[in-house]
Amino acid sequence: MIVVKIGGDLISDGLPEALVDSIVSLTKEHQVILVHGGGDVVTRISTELGHPPKFVVSPKGFRSRYTDREEAGIFTMVMAGKINKEIVSALQGRGVPAVGLSGLDGALVRATRKKKIVALDERGRRMLMEGGYTGKIDGVNAEFLGLLMENGYVPVVSSFAMGEEGEPLNVDGDRMASSLATAMGAEKLVLLTDVEKILMGGKPIDTLSVYEAKAALEGIGPGMITKLYAAIEALEGGVGETVISSGFVENPIESALEHKVGTVIRR
């Protein structure tokens, strides 16, 4: 089984045909779970609706969307409606039995709502904020997902989870992919983004051990730190290998799995 996370940069102008080809090819030989982001599309539509998003940075360097009640509604509408169904439609059109899901469906991914969050202000000082509609993943309904996959379906999961009161909670897509990969005992996790490799000191990195990845966290920028954390969590959860790679190259998933491109992180 292989879990593939499709980053928002790959979706902002529609799913690249080469990526669709790569997914179709992969599903012929492997069980596959797709997880997708779509923050750029959410930002555009949220702004058009008169509710421009607000972003916060944590003391550890995580950059995330601050999700209030209205933003949560827009996020759910765009992610589970527009983006998820566009991906499902593209795959169904190629004969792949894709099923669109979110963390709410079948209580697939459960999360605890964050009551308070710590963020940095413009001067880099810590400040305490209401948590809004963001959550920390604490459970996956592996039995439900397994039933779908045993019957030949390909889950396409949008990255928000279900809170304790059934409310939608914004969770990071890379961490969701990591949680699903761990819960389902995946062999590999592929995190597709808009860069071919992790850069350290301006140099592209081919491979990292978990130890090296942890040591690199402090020097990694906000765009990559969450992916690196997700990779580490997956490996420590039993996933065999994680690759962070570009979704814009030729045969993006095969190229990542064959180590022709991307940064490979191993236990």
Image (tube, helix red, strand yellow):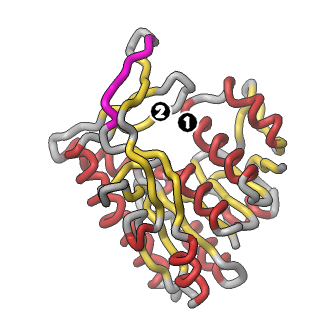
In percent of the image, x 36 and y 51: which residue is there?
169
**Amino acid type of the residue tagged 2 in the rendering:** Arg
Secondary structure at badge 2 equals strand
Between residue 95 and residue 146, name the one nearer to us. Answer: 146
Q: Total label count?
A: 2
Q: How far is mark 2 from mark 1, CA to CA?
A: 8 Å
Image quadrant containing the N terminus? bottom right
* Image-quadrant location for residue 208: top right
- Crowdedness of circle 1 by 10 Å Cα count: few (<14), some, many (20+)? few
214 sits to left or right of 153: right
129 sits to left or right of 245: left
Residue 147: image location, x then y, percent:
55, 84
**Amino acid type of the residue tagged 1 in the rendering:** Gly
* Image-quadrant location for residue 212: top right
Q: Is residue 219 above or below residue 124?
A: below
117 sits to left or right of 239: left
Point out the tag, 2 or 1, that comes first from the N-terminus: 2
Residue 200: image location, x then y, percent:
74, 29
In percent of the image, x 32 and y 50: which residue is there?
42
Per the rendered image, the range of residues in magenta is 125-131
Determine which residue is flagged by label 1: 223
In percent of the image, x 25 and y 50: which residue is there?
45
* Image-quadrant location for residue 184: bottom right
Determine which residue is flagged by label 2: 63
Residue found at the very far left of the displayed protein? 50
Q: Is residue 229 above or below residue 57?
A: below
Residue 155: image location, x then y, percent:
51, 75
In percent of the image, x 66 and y 60: which residue is there?
182
Residue 123: in magenta span:
no
Q: Main secondary structure of the magenta part?
A: strand
Q: Are marks 2 and 1 in contact (CB under 8 Å)?
A: yes
